[in-house]
Image (cartoon, grey):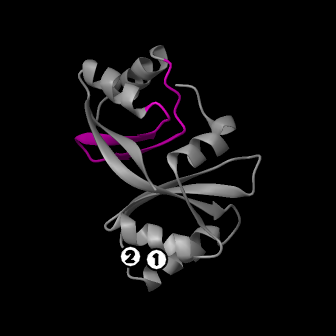
Amino acid sequence: MKIQQLSVFLENKPGQMAGVFDILGSNGVNIITMSTADTEQFGILRIITREWEKAKTVLEEGQFVVNLTPVVAIQVPHKPGGLSSILAIFQKQNINIEYMYAFPCAHTTEAVLIARFEDPDAAIKVVRESENFKALTEEDVFKEKKACEIQS
């Protein structure tokens, strides 16, 4: 139940992100969600897209450094305490989260948490055993969130 995330490494200077989105947009790649992290000298743009293979190819052709990272998508209630409740389960099971980001969808009562785990298989097992959460496949994420896609 892991999904592929693109991690694009960028210099921390004006225009770098625009170059990524120009390439993706001109190649018809829609982004489901994204996140950025930075340091003083470089940044990492993390992207979830249905067309991850195509996105990786066109970005590499554009001279960007791109890595694939397996992440876990978890459906959580989009309400106060929804995130806290899943984090409590991971804490209780001593499962480390390296980083995470989320995206809600306005037309549902759910949100999707994207997380990189130290042990993703253990995280998936815990989610499957819970009553209030669901580990999503790529098909689930892309099917359920199609209306939430943002154009590049």
Q: Are marks 1 and 2 in contact (CB under 8 Å)?
A: yes
- Residue 122 is situated, as x and y percent measured from the top left of the image, at 39, 72
Amino acid beneath label 1: Phe
Q: Residues within 10 Å of mark 2 (few under 14, many from 20)?
A: some
Q: Which mark is residue 3?
A: none
Q: Nearer the viewer, residue 6 or 129?
A: 129
Per the image, the residue denoted by label 2 is 95
Residue, x 39% and y 44% (percent of image)? 5
Q: Residue 78 sits in which quadrant?
A: bottom right
Q: Does residue 84 appear in this view? A: yes
Residues drawn in magenta: 28-51
Q: Would residue 71 be found to the left or right of residue 114 on screen?
A: left
Instruction: Tell me the SS state at disc 1.
Output: helix
- Residue 14 is situated, as x and y percent measured from the top left of the image, at 34, 27
- Residue 79 is situated, as x and y percent measured from the top left of the image, at 71, 65
- Residue 105 is situated, as x and y percent measured from the top left of the image, at 68, 47
Mark pair 1, 2: CA separation: 5 Å
Q: Would residue 11 be found to the left or right of residue 104 on screen?
A: left
Residue 43 falls inside the magenta stretch? yes
Residue 104 falls inside the magenta stretch? no
Amino acid beneath label 2: Ile
Per the image, the residue denoted by label 1 is 90
Q: Residues within 10 Å of mark 1 (few under 14, many from 20)?
A: some
Q: Is residue 51 above or below residue 92?
A: above
Q: Is residue 132 above or below residue 29?
A: below
Q: Residue 35 sits in which quadrant?
A: top left
Instruction: Tell me the SS state at disc 2.
Output: loop
Q: Is residue 130 above or below residue 138?
A: below
Residue, x 23% and y 22% (percent of image)? 63
Q: Earlier in the sequence, mark 1 or mark 2?
A: 1
Q: Nearer the viewer, residue 16 or 123?
A: 123
